[in-house]
Amino acid sequence: RVRDVTGVQTCALPISKRERWRPVVVALCAIALAFGWQFLRVHFFYADNWTSLFSTGQRMPIPEELRQREHIYQVPDSVGYDGQAYHLIAHDPLLRRGYANYLDLPRVRLRRILVPALAALLSFGNSDWVDRAYFAVILGFIFLGSLWLASWSMSHGHGAFWGLAFLATPAVLYAIPLMLIDVSLVALTIGFIWFAERKSGAGVFVTLTLAGLARETGVLLIGGWCLLLLLQRQFGRAIIY
C-alpha cells in the first residue's frame, strides 16, 4: 500500500514492463471503435461528407471562403451545435480572418482554445488539413483518456479493459459524432489523477495547464489542487501552481 496525493492509503501498484503494452492496446481499440462509429455515421447518413460531424446549422452564417472550399454540410432548419464554432476557431485561431464574427458566443468559445489550437498547429497552418487535424485531435484525446484510465485501473489491481469505459462517458459519447471539445477536459482530468498518484510534478503541471485551456471549468481542477497543497502546508508548491 502507498499513500496517494491526499495522504490516504490506497492499493496503487506499479505496472510491470511486461504489462505496459496492455493500456496501449486498449487505447488503440478505443480510437478504432470511435473512428468506426464516425465512419459509419458519415458514410451511411451524410454521403461521406465529413464536415457533417461539425453539425453546422443552416440558420448560422458561414464564411463564404470556407463554404466554397469545404462544401460544409449544414443541418436543415437548425442553428447547429457547438462543434461548428470550434471548427471555425481552428481555421482562424489568431483571429486574422474575421471568423470570430461568425461565432454565437465569441468570448466563451475562444476561451476554450485547446482543441482548435492543437488542430491548427497539427495542420501547420494549411487550411486544407485543418479538418483532418481536428478529427485527429479528438481521437488523440480519446486515446489518452483510455490509456490513462486503463493504466490507472491496472495500478489498482483491475483489468486494463476498464479503459474502454472512457468511451461511455457523456463527453466522449457526444464528442465522437459532434466534435465537441469536452472530451479533452475529461481526458486531462484522468491524466491529472494518474500523474498525481505517481508524484509526477511535470505531468501534473502539464495536465492542469492544458485543462485550463480546454474549458474554463478546468480552472476548478487547478483550484482544487492548490487547495489540497495549502491544506498540506505545501505553500511553495501551491504558489507555483
Image: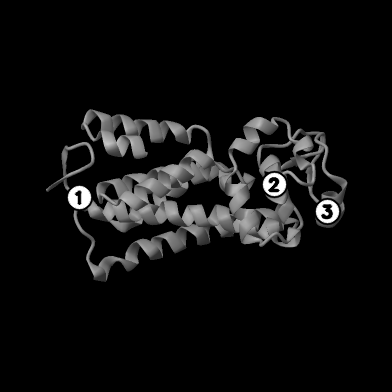
Element on which disc 1 rests:
loop
Tag 3: residue type? His
Residue under pointer 2 = 94
Q: Residues within 10 Å of mark 3 (few under 14, many from 20)?
A: few
- Which is more toward the observer, 10 or 34? 10
* Extreme-left residue of the structure: 1
- Spatial CA span between label 2 and label 1: 43 Å
- Which is more toward the observer, 233 or 203? 233
Residue 75 picture quarter: top right
The residue depicted at 83 percent of the width and 53 percent of the height is 71
Q: Is residue 187 above or below residue 43?
A: above
> Looking at the rendered structure, which numbered label has been put on residue 129?
none
* Extreme-bottom residue of the structure: 18
Residue under pointer 1 = 12
- Spatial CA span between label 2 and label 3: 23 Å
Residue 39 picture quarter: bottom right
- Which is more toward the observer, 215 or 240? 240
The residue depicted at 68 percent of the width and 47 percent of the height is 93
Whole-percent x and y of residue 45?
72, 52
Mark 2 or mark 1, which is nearer to you? 2
Element on which disc 2 rests:
loop
